[in-house]
Amino acid sequence: MVQFRRSSYKRVSKWDIFYYVYGMLHQSGYREKFADNLKRELPRLPFAEDFRDFSVAGKELTHLHLDCEQMKPFPLKWIESKDVPLSYRVEDKMRLSKDKKSLTVNPSLTLSGIPPEAFQYRLGNRSALEWVIDQYQVTEDHRTALTEPSR
């Protein structure tokens, strides 16, 4: 157990604590160890001896999560069909190729060159990218016969 001294808190800002909590809550070992508790109650965070490391990691992770729109997109190859007018809309359902290196958005557009790292971030038992592909599909409202993307 880590002993606290009042003098050690003078060097810790409120932002250091926020980033520490953010980093700790996203640490896979913590989430696995306390998975059952996190389903039922508010999280309890241990004071790690490497507080600064968790705080720095939490700050970097916060930057990635909040400033993702300002990052450069990954350079995917856009393959456009010559027979069909180009459209960016999902017309039915996006489909991932068997080798998971390309994504067919619609008959006129395929995105190729998806890196394997894109499948490492997981939501439950599948990757976040696979989850989005599965969830984002066009549905038809039977009452009005209008089609719209379901989310």
Image: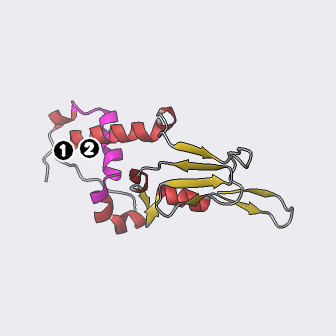
Q: Please give the name of the residue rendered at 50% of the width and 64% of the height, measured from the top-left corner.
A: 98
Q: Relative to residue 44, is residue 113 drawn left or right?
A: right
The answer to whether the residue labelled 2 contacts the one labelled 1, judged by CB atoms less than 8 Å apart, is: yes
Q: Is residue 18 magenta?
A: yes
Q: How many marks?
A: 2
Other residues around mark 2 within 10 Å, as few (<14) / some (14–19) / many (≥20): many
Numbered mark located on residue 111 in the image = none
For residue 54, which numbered disc appears in the image? 2
Q: Amino acid at mark 1?
A: Asp
Span shown in magenta: 10-30
The answer to whether residue 123 is left or right of residue 134 is left
Q: Is residue 40 rendered to the left or right of residue 93?
A: left
Q: Disc 2 and disc 1: Cα gap in Å? A: 7 Å
Left or right: residue 128 versus residue 17 is: right
Q: Quadrant of the N terminus?
A: bottom left
Give the residue at the far front of this rendering: 82
In percent of width and height, residue 17 lies at 31, 39
Residue 124 visible in rendering: no
